[in-house]
Amino acid sequence: MGFFDFLFGKKPQKGVENESVSSASAGFFGNSKFQLSDVYNIKGVGIVVVGKVIDGALVPGQTAQVNGKKTTVKTIEAHHKRLAEAKVGQDIGVALSGVSREDFLPGMIIEFS
């Protein structure tokens, strides 16, 4: 079940495969930039940041430093579907570990590697 489903009270569906987005050469060197729009603290998921990928490709497992804290991408979703990879221009939600809501400001740019 995705983290947006908690917001809308949807029940998990069994046997639904994750949708992946193919990426051309985006993120070839491993760095990607994400512009933050909003932050949510969702029960059972944790911190979810919403925004747009502005450079590179974002995949689960990438890390970043936010206010001196190391964070890791747990999952990525777009339009209620889990993604294996998000590419430039996509509006996505990203579940992060190791941070709190107060670590983020709207409009900040997060660089993942």
Image (spheres, rainbow, N blue to C red):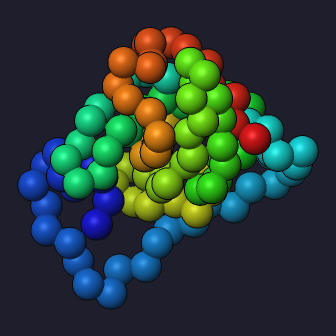
- Where does the image place residue 19, in percent across and percent down from the top left? 50, 68
**Of the pair 74 and 87, the residue shown nearer to us:** 74
- Where does the image place residue 34, in percent across and percent down from the top left? 61, 29
Residue 89 visible at all: no
Residue 54 visible at all: yes
Quadrant housing the N terminus: bottom left
Tell me the residue at 55%/48% (across/down): 73
6 in relation to 52, above or below: below
Count of labels in the image: 0
- Residue pushed farthest bottom? 15
**Of the pair 42 and 87, the residue shown nearer to us:** 42
Quadrant housing the C terminus: top right
Tell me the residue at 60%/22% (across/down): 68
1 in relation to 47, above or below: below
* Left or right placement of residue 104 versus residue 72 in this view: left
- Residue pushed farthest left? 9
* Left or right placement of residue 56 versus residue 96 in this view: right
**Of the pair 35 and 25, the residue shown nearer to us:** 35
- Where does the image place residue 13, in percent across and percent down from the top left? 23, 77
- Where does the image place residue 38, in percent across and percent down from the top left? 37, 23
* Res 88 quadrant in image: top right
- Residue pushed farthest front? 68
* Res 14 quadrant in image: bottom left
